[in-house]
Amino acid sequence: MWKGMDEHDIIPVCPVCGQPVRQRDASGAYRGWHVQCDSRMRAAMDAKRRARQAEELDERLRYWSAMLTDATGDIRVSVIDRNTVAAERDHWAAVLTVERCRQAILAMRMTPDEVNRYRDPWLRRLCADIGRDGMDLIADRVGWSGARPWRRDPATARDGTLHAAGQLPVPADPDTREGYRGDLERSPGAALTVMGALDHIWKEDNTGTPGEPGPWRLR
Ligand SMILES: [Zn+2]
């Protein structure tokens, strides 16, 4: 008698070939499938395991896609809010740029000795705001023949302090794929350079013929 043999044991059906399995394993119990079907059985089990793994990875991928959609939505809202603030702030910077340029023009016109001496803290702050390149540009436009002390002032950077924050591109809406970019793009002009400010002032002030170096309105 086989150990563990039982008259009432149900003879299994081989899941690979569909035939009854009368073969027994070392313990005497019926095998689940035929010895000759073994390699096909293993292949089938491997395939099942791979399919389960793929399903699990798909599930994880769906999870992270959803997380990414949420995160994109958050970034999008942050960029829109940030751009709204930047537009306001850059408008202020543009107004300040025009104001500073006009002040520099006035200083060269009305107090050239002060500019040459370069001792007045107000003047030095003005130069620091406009920057070395901007001050050179103003001096060129005004026809300034005095010293250019801002060039050797370590407190004055090349491009000054009046930088525009500018507008960041808004990521596409992760849900609707609609954007509000059109609204934001209607508020440009924030990035006003010294060159742009001078052109603006020139248009306001210039009553001479084209090519004349002035006049710059003194007020
Ligand atoms: Zn079989």
Image (cartoon, rainbow, N blue to C red):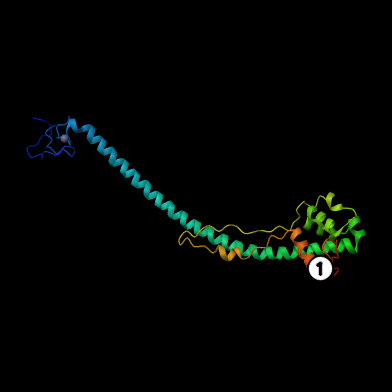
Image quarter (top left, top right, bottom left or bottom right) of the N terminus: top left
| Secondary structure type for disc 1 | helix
Query: Does mark 1 have its CB less than 8 Å from ligand 1?
Result: no
Asked if 218 appears above or below 6 in the picture, the reply is below
- Which residue is drawn at the image coordinates 91% and 60% (left, top)? 112
Nearest to the observer: residue 198 or residue 83? 198
- The image position of residue 144, as x and y in percent, is 88, 57
Residue 68 in the figure: left or right of residue 110: left
Q: Quadrant of residue 4?
A: top left
Type of amino acid under label 1: Asp
- Which residue is drawn at the image coordinates 18% and 30% (left, top)? 36
Nearest to the observer: residue 215 or residue 177? 215
Name the outermost residue toward the left: 7
Residue hosting label 1: 205
Nearest to the observer: residue 153 or residue 178? 178
- The image position of residue 78, as x and y in percent, is 56, 60
- The image position of residue 74, as x and y in percent, is 52, 59
Please count the marks in the image: 1
- For disc 1, the neighbor class at 10 Å (few under 14, some 14 to 19, many from 20) is some
Query: On the rendering, which quadrant does ligand 1 occupy?
Result: top left
- The image position of residue 130, as x and y in percent, is 78, 57
- Which residue is drawn at the image coordinates 81% and 68% (left, top)? 205
Name the outermost residue toward the bottom: 219
